[in-house]
Image: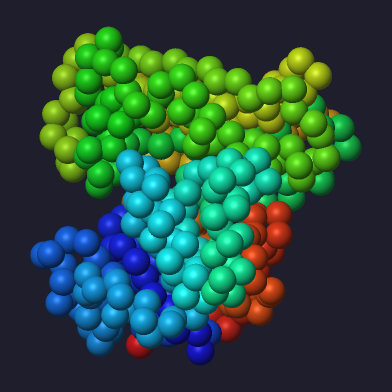
């Protein structure tokens, strides 16, 4: 049984608590939080499981890491605090833990990460004997292992396209929706997530990872961004009103250019209401989200994945699959030599020991 700590209990951390509880080879050994209002609360309550797990949340990082856990699921945000997130993660790696996280965009493809970041991680690995695996919650598997797997079914492959289609009205993170992505803001507002070079910073590593998996060299990575305004004011259940004339939909591509042509594309299509940009791609049944891989070539192959949580929410369901990928990698990483790993290194493992199993 691998003692496992979950660090952060927001949208991702809440799902990580559930995933750790569900894996037979993992034992929840600690929960770290930064919100004083969560200190002292049971992990089962924070995970919304409806039952206690007997592990109480704390903000005492020294005490938790001092127990030298086997693994840490780092679910705290790195979006607005990348340096702090990296420092936290390196601390856990130096303590000998296997760390899995979506928080460090630049390490989705470690080979193309900044040299200083790679050096810092490798030094922590050498000092403490831990390991690090970073994969996204957009979800990572939809932008690495799935497209590479599906591409192998084609005779001729012209373009590999990965799509996330998402209705933000169901997303429980208003600050990100309104201010980072810019939904509900005037059309002259400059959303930080859409600023030049930012999409490539976040998703460029996954484009490069796919290119490496396909054995091709990229000329460059390009960005294409489009935004649409709402025609009417809409009300959402989680975030209130979004006014007519404000941003209601965003579509962007991060393109890997091969021989002058966009051959590897990661595309995101997001809305706060289905009436905005109806000509853009939608989920097959008009639902609130889907992940799709399209292989243009001979034959043309299209695979759509729709994941829902117990409440039927696809946003949470998609995040849960991404968390499942990370938590599911812990046992493999614990058995592997210490190191810095990526999605091409870490196999997507079957649900060994979990078929039909529901934690008590």
Query: Residue at (44%, 81%) from the top-left corner?
Result: 69
Left or right, 203 with respect to 85, comes to right
Residue 244 place in picture, x, y as percent: 19, 15
Outermost residue, left direction?
37
Q: Quadrant of the C terminus?
A: bottom left
The residue closer to the viewer here, 233 or 36, is 36
* Residue 285 showing in the rendered view: no
Query: Residue at (74%, 50%) from the top-left corner?
Result: 149
Query: Residue at (58%, 62%) from the top-left corner?
Result: 123
Q: How many marks?
A: 0
* Residue 341 showing in the rendered view: yes
The residue closer to the viewer here, 288 or 28, is 28
Residue 200 place in picture, x, y as percent: 54, 29
Whether residue 151 is situated above or below residue 248 in the rendered picture:
below
Left or right, 81 with respect to 210, comes to left
Whether residue 5 is situated above or below residue 319 in the rendered picture:
below
The residue closer to the viewer here, 1 or 273, is 1
Left or right, 135 with respect to 347, comes to left
Residue 174 place in picture, x, y as percent: 22, 39
Whether residue 288 is situated above or below residue 16 in the rendered picture:
above
The residue closer to the viewer here, 241 or 216, is 216
Residue 55 place in picture, x, y as percent: 27, 83
Quadrant position of residue 235: top left
Query: Residue at (34%, 26%) from the top-left corner?
Result: 192
Q: How is the image coloured?
A: rainbow
Quadrant position of residue 220: top right
Whether residue 187 is situated above or below residue 70 in the rendered picture:
above
Outermost residue, right direction?
155
């Amino acid at each position: 049984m691998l003692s496992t700590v979950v660090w952060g209990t927001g949208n991702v951390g809440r799902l990580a608590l559930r995933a750790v509880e569900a894996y037979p080879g993992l034992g929840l050994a600690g929960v770290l939080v930064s919100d004083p209002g969560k200190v002292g609360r049971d992990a089962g309550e924070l995970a919304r499981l409806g039952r206690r797990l007997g592990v109480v949340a704390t903000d005492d990082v020294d005490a938790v890491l001092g127990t030298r856990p086997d693994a840490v699921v780092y679910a705290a945000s790195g979006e607005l605090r990348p340096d702090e997130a990296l420092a936290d993660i390196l601390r856990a790696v130096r303590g000998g833990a296997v760390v899995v996280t979506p928080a460090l965009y630049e390490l989705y493809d470690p080979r193309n990460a900044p040299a200083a970041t790679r050096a810092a991680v490798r030094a922590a690995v050498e000092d403490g004997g831990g390991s690090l695996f970073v994969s996204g919650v957009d979800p990572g598997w939809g932008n690495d292992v799935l497209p590479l797997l599906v591409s192998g079914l084609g005779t001729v492959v012209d373009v590999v396209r990965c799509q996330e289609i998402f209705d933000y009205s169901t997303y429980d993170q208003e600050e990100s929706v309104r201010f980072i992505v810019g939904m509900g803001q005037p059309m002259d507002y400059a959303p930080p997530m859409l600023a030049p070079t930012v999409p490539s910073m976040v998703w460029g590593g996954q484009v490069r990872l796919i290119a490496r998996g396909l054995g091709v060299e990229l000329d460059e990575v390009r960005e294409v961004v489009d935004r649409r305004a709402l025609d009417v004011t809409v009300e959402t259940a989680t975030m209130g009103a979004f006014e007519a004339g404000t941003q209601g939909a965003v579509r962007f591509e991060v393109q890997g250019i091969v021989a002058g042509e966009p051959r590897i594309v990661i595309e995101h299509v997001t809305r706060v209401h289905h009436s905005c940009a109806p000509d853009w791609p939608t989920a097959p049944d008009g639902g609130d989200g889907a992940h799709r891989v399209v292989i243009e070539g001979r034959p043309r192959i299209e695979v759509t994945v729709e994941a829902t949580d117990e409440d039927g929410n696809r946003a949470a369901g998609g995040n849960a699959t991404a968390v499942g990928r990370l938590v599911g990698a812990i046992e493999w990483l614990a058995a592997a030599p210490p190191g810095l790993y990526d999605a091409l290194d870490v196999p997507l493992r079957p649900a060994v020991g979990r078929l039909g199993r529901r934690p008590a």
